[in-house]
Image: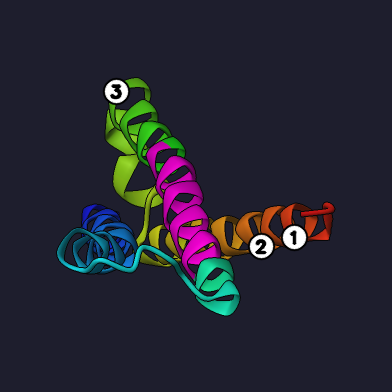
Amino acid sequence: LLTVLSFVDLCYANSIVPQMLAHLLSARKSIPFHSCVLQLCASLASGGSEFFLLGAMAYDRYVAVCHPLHYTIIMHGGLCLGLAAGCLVAGFMNSLMETIMTFRLPL
């Protein structure tokens, strides 16, 4: 779960920092509409996935503290992989819904 959390944090930084650096170094401070949609969706997906991953990591610690003798049976590799994949899918679906609702508003 820590590896996936590190990857999500890296994706979050890479979805925002390049555009920010481009705007700091150029005189033109505009962003095309499709780039705005993509950047919003990527940053929301990374942020949402991070929150879901932190919840899965809290469950992992709960099992380790409350059921230490059964930890390896409960938190086997398949469950950890399923939790990580579920967190990524939930974060992406959440960001997709929020992005669609945001750009349906009158601008």
Residue most extreme to the left: 25
Secondary structure of the residue carrying tag 2 is helix
Q: Which residue is mark 1?
A: 103
Residue 2 located left or right of residue 104: left
Secondary structure of the residue carrying tag 1 is helix
- Within the image, what quadrant is residue 76 found in? bottom left
Marks 1 and 3 sit apart, C-alpha to C-alpha, by 44 Å
> Residue 92: percent from the left, percent from the top?
58, 64
Within 10 Å of disc 3 (Cα), the crowding (few <14, some 14-19, many 20+) is few
Q: Residue at x 55, y 56 (%)?
A: 91
> Residue 22: percent from the left, percent from the top?
23, 69
Q: Do labels 1 and 3 touch, CB within 8 Å?
A: no
Q: Amino acid at mark 3?
A: Val
Q: Quadrant of the N terminus?
A: bottom left
Within 10 Å of disc 1 (Cα), the crowding (few <14, some 14-19, many 20+) is few
Depth order, front residue of 75/39: 39
Depth order, front residue of 66/44: 44
Residue 47 located left or right of residue 93: left
Within 10 Å of disc 2 (Cα), the crowding (few <14, some 14-19, many 20+) is some
Q: Which residue is mark 3?
A: 65
Q: Amino acid at mark 2?
A: Met
Marks 1 and 2 sit apart, C-alpha to C-alpha, by 16 Å
Q: Amino acid at mark 1?
A: Phe
- 74 w.r.t. 66: above or below: below
- 103 w.r.t. 72: above or below: below
> Residue 62: percent from the left, percent from the top?
38, 27
User: Reading the chain from its start, which is encountered first: label 1 or label 2?
Assistant: 2
